[in-house]
Amino acid sequence: MYEKIQSQEKLTKTIANLAIEKGWMSAEESAAYVKEESRPLETIIDLANIHGWLLGKIEDAESRYAALVTKLLKQDAERLEDMKRAAFAFGAETAVEESRPSALFNAMDSLMLDGMPCDGACMVIDSSDESFAWELRLDVHRAFWREAGGDPANYFALRNEVVAGFLSKSDKRVVTEDEHTYRFVAR
């Protein structure tokens, strides 16, 4: 779970670095959105309240990411295309050459922050050698984007690019069957 939070933090930093590079915001401004934690988990976690500690970290990471992207897009909606390219590159940094759908899904899922495991946000609904599909049963992101005054569709536009980048070395791609259902298909 902590690795998923760290992955979200790295994506936030990627978007913040893009904003600095493009002159959309200063490094000082970006500091409000970026948190870097390099200490080992066992030295920082609240052992008396592990669930609450993780939940707080998830909410903090999701809130800052939504606020950053929303702020940048409110200034200029055209920036989304640059952000999508950065999100694809972010996903490509961890791309794997894997063809087994279940292994590919597990590797991809280890990057994506979809709330706590007990939320059951992401559920595999079809798993075989020929077919693999999953459903986002609970949109744990929407509230953070609405709270930031943003459009939750921007979260999914960037998420889809992260996934596409992650799959760039595999023989699979993801198709969206409906608003909540995704499937691996051959390229």
Image (spheres, rainbow, N blue to C red):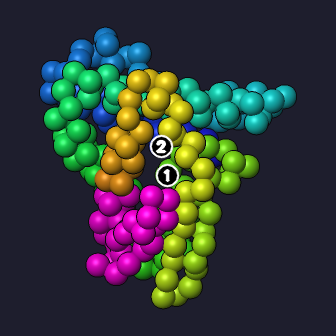
Q: Is residue 173 magenta?
A: yes
The residue sitting at 32% across, 60% down in the picture is 164
Q: Quadrant of the C terminus?
A: bottom left
Above or below — where is 181 with respect to 112?
Answer: below
Kindly indicate whether the residue at mark 2 contacts the one at mark 1 (C-beta within 8 angstroms): yes
Q: Position of residue 79 (x, y in %)?
A: 19, 34
- Residue 167: numbered disc: none
* Residue 40 coordinates in the image, percent (x, y): 62, 35
What is the quadrant of residue 73 in the picture? top left
The image quadrant that residue 96 belongs to is bottom left
Query: Which is more N-terminal, label 2 or label 1?
Result: 2
Q: Eyeballing the image, is 86 above or below 162?
A: above
Residue at image position (49%, 52%) is 111
The residue drawn where x is 49% and y is 24% is: 147
Q: Nearer the viewer, residue 47 or 111?
A: 111
Which element type, helix, strand or loop, lies under badge 2?
A: helix
In the picture, measured across the screen, residue 138 lies left or right of residue 79, that is right
Q: Establish if 150 lies above or below 185.
A: above
Picture coordinates of residue 33, whole percent (x, y): 41, 22
Q: Residues within 10 Å of mark 1 (few under 14, many from 20)?
A: many
Residue topped by disc 1: 111
Single out the residue that lies furthest toward the top. Answer: 28
Residue with the mark numbered 2: 7
Q: Which residues are magenta?
A: 163-187
Instruction: Answer with the quarter of the image where residue 2 lies.
Output: top right
- Separation of marks 1 and 2 at Cα, in angstroms: 6 Å
Tag 1, which secondary structure?
loop
